[in-house]
């Protein structure tokens, strides 16, 4: 008998090639309302998973916890059970002035400022999304902000302001902690990936306060979260895939 994956508890009997991942297990619960025929799958460590259908397409939604290592495990275990397309629906801090709260930032590529992915492939290897998924994002959400994002490892770093000023000046749009790992490891395993981020911190705003506002359901951020989940569902259920 096939054993469940050790961390996510997934099995090939999830019977879908498409998954949405997100850091926060509570966001998985908030995603239920958009699916039909919802089935709880597992909740082990930080990995909470549900299955359901959206416009006839069966889709897995699963949390990964925070950061590259736990996301790397999630991507590996998704691959082990037959998932081929993964979209991250995360939160981010804006790195350019003028990107309002709740606006969507979609990565055309990621600055790999994490510790894990260079253990897979050298740092000169690009972290990029799948063109097919990115093209569908443009179709369903032409108004989103598209560009380079930065995935980092340290939320409470003494040199945050300096690093953000540096990468902002290079044109980076927003920061998260998982997109780079998902894209690099996903690409190594032959998966198609995309990252859709809901802005929860204005550029040069208070990082911790922004994340708390998301937890407390601030209106603009809640709307951004809903928009990001629906966009991922529309892409993964598109007939062209
Ligand atoms: O809201 P999630 O998906 O967890 O994403 C962002 O929020 C967390 C930090 O507060 C990090 O995981 C970051 O990438
Ligand atoms: O600024 C932010 C906000 C959320 N998550 C991050 O990684 N950075």
Image (tube, rainbow, N blue to C red):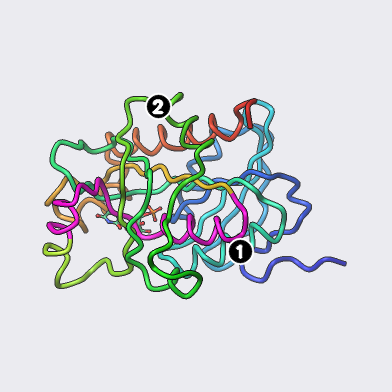
Q: Secondary structure at mark 2?
A: loop
**Magenta span has 179?**
yes
Tell me if residue 157 comes above or below residue 30 in the rendering. below
Tell me where residue 99 appears, x and y as whole percent: 20, 37
Q: Secondary structure at mark 1?
A: helix
Quadrant field for ligand 1:
bottom left
Horizontally, residue 200 falls left or right of residue 81, namely: left
Closer to the chain start, of discs 2 and 1, is 1
- Residue behind mark 2: 141
Magenta segment range?
Answer: 164-191
Q: Residue at x 27, y 34 (%)?
A: 220
Residue 76's disc number = 1
The one of 6 and 241 positioned closer to us in this rendering = 241
Q: Residue at x 11, y 64 (%)?
A: 162
Tell me where residue 54 appears, x and y as whole percent: 62, 30
Q: In terms of image quadrants, where is residue 209?
A: bottom left
Tell me where residue 10 appears, x and y as whole percent: 69, 59
Horizontally, residue 234 falls left or right of residue 100, namely: right
């Amino acid at each position: 008998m096939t054993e469940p994956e050790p961390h996510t508890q997934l099995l090939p009997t999830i019977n879908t090639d498409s998954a949405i991942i997100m850091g926060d297990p509570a966001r998985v619960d908030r995603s239920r309302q958009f699916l039909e025929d919802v089935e709880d799958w597992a909740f082990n460590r930080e990995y909470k998973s549900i299955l359901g259908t959206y416009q006839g397409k069966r889709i897995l939604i699963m949390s990964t916890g925070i950061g590259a290592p736990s996301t790397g495990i999630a991507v590996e275990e998704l691959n082990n059970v037959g998932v081929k397309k993964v979209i991250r629906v995360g939160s981010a801090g804006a790195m350019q002035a003028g990107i309002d709260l709740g606006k969507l930032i979609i990565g055309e590529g990621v600055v790999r400022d994490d510790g894990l992915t260079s253990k897979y492939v050298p740092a000169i290897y690009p972290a990029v999304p799948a063109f097919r998924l990115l093209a569908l994002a443009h179709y369903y959400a032409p108004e989103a902000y598209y560009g380079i994002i930065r995935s980092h490892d340290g939320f409470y770093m003494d040199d945050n302001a300096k690093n953000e000023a540096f990468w902002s000046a290079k044109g980076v749009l927003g920061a998260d902690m998982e997109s780079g790992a998902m894209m690099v490891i996903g690409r190594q395993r032959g998966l198609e990936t995309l990252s859709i981020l809901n802005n929860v911190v204005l550029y040069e705003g208070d990082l911790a306060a922004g994340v708390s506002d998301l937890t407390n359901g601030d209106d603009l951020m809640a709307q951004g979260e809903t928009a990001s989940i629906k966009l991922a569902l529309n892409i993964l259920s598109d007939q062209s895939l």
